[in-house]
Image (cartoon, helix red, strand yellow):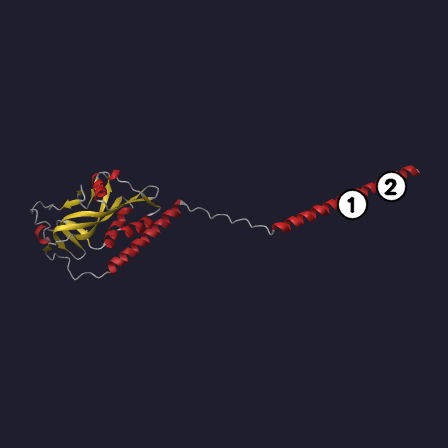
Amino acid sequence: MTLALREKADLFDRIQRQFRRAERHRERIAFQAALDEIARRGPPVPAPPPPPPAPTARQVDAEERARFDQAMRDLLVRVHARPVPDRTRQDDGAWWSNERVAGYRVWSISQGGVWGAKTRWDSPTKSAVCLKGHGATGTIPHLEAECGEPACGIYALKDPDAAWARAWHQMTQVTTAIGMVEMEGRVIEHSHGYRAERATITRLCVIARLPTREVRLALLDEAGDIERLCRAPATVAMPLSRPGLGEALEVARAWL
């Protein structure tokens, strides 16, 4: 190799070595800059945990039913734990009161109206008739010995919890109303309730379970609203909503 070629080769090698040193220097500078940026930002923020899976419809229905059943069991325990008055189930005789007597009842609601155990309530006030077909106004309700079982009269319970306990089984099937009545006229007292000549609804809680499991409620204490419900239930708004019967029951019991 001639001297000129050897000098050119040496020059080329020096240029390549300088170029590699420059590249390594730039890489060190970039790496240090990245370390400085990481130190400035602080430790990395951990990613939030994934949300729990949404409950299935079967789980929601089971939880709702469990809450409702527990509320009913608690209610039944309170009812049966209360002392029974010192009266027998037989009539103690009719009596009259200058003041109205409060009691509690359960109704079923349909497009046709508000229904008691046997007849429809066309208005908030209902007068009893003897379904056996005898007895004039003023002698109703009869003593049990006079017209047999079931004896006539407008029935009401003394204890609101007892009314809730009787209503729970129909809440899952039909629109149900639980309310307070004031009885007057001739009244016969029994161990757990009354039979009266007349009764007027003063407070009413309507509970309707929708196919979506949502529960709608209407809390009525105005005479005009109760009158409208008796005449045309479909015209009465159900403004309150709860996701299940258990929560709806808590709201209704607290109000009534």
Pick the quarter of the image with the N terminus: top right
User: Circle 2 — which element?
Assistant: helix
Tag of residue 21: 1
Q: Residue at x 23, y 52 (%)?
A: 163
Sequence-wise, which precedes: disc 2 or disc 1? 2
Give residue 4's position: percent from left, percent from top: 91, 37
Q: Residue at x 37, y 50 (%)?
A: 63
| Mark 2 and mark 1: Cα distance apart in space | 17 Å
Q: Nearer the viewer, residue 78 or 197?
A: 197
Give residue 119's position: percent from left, percent from top: 17, 43
- Return the residue at label 2: 10
Left or right of 116 in this view: 34: right
* Residue 11 found in image quarter: top right
Q: Is label 2 or label 1 in front?
A: 1
User: Circle 1 — which element?
Assistant: helix
Q: Residue at x 29, y 53 (%)?
A: 72
Left or right of 20 in this view: 67: left
Which amino acid type is shown beneath numbered disc 1? Answer: Arg
Give residue 206's position: percent from left, percent from top: 26, 45
Q: Nearer the viewer, residue 99 or 150?
A: 99
Q: Is residue 37 visible?
A: yes
Extreme-right residue of the structure: 2
Which amino acid type is shown beneath numbered disc 2? Answer: Asp
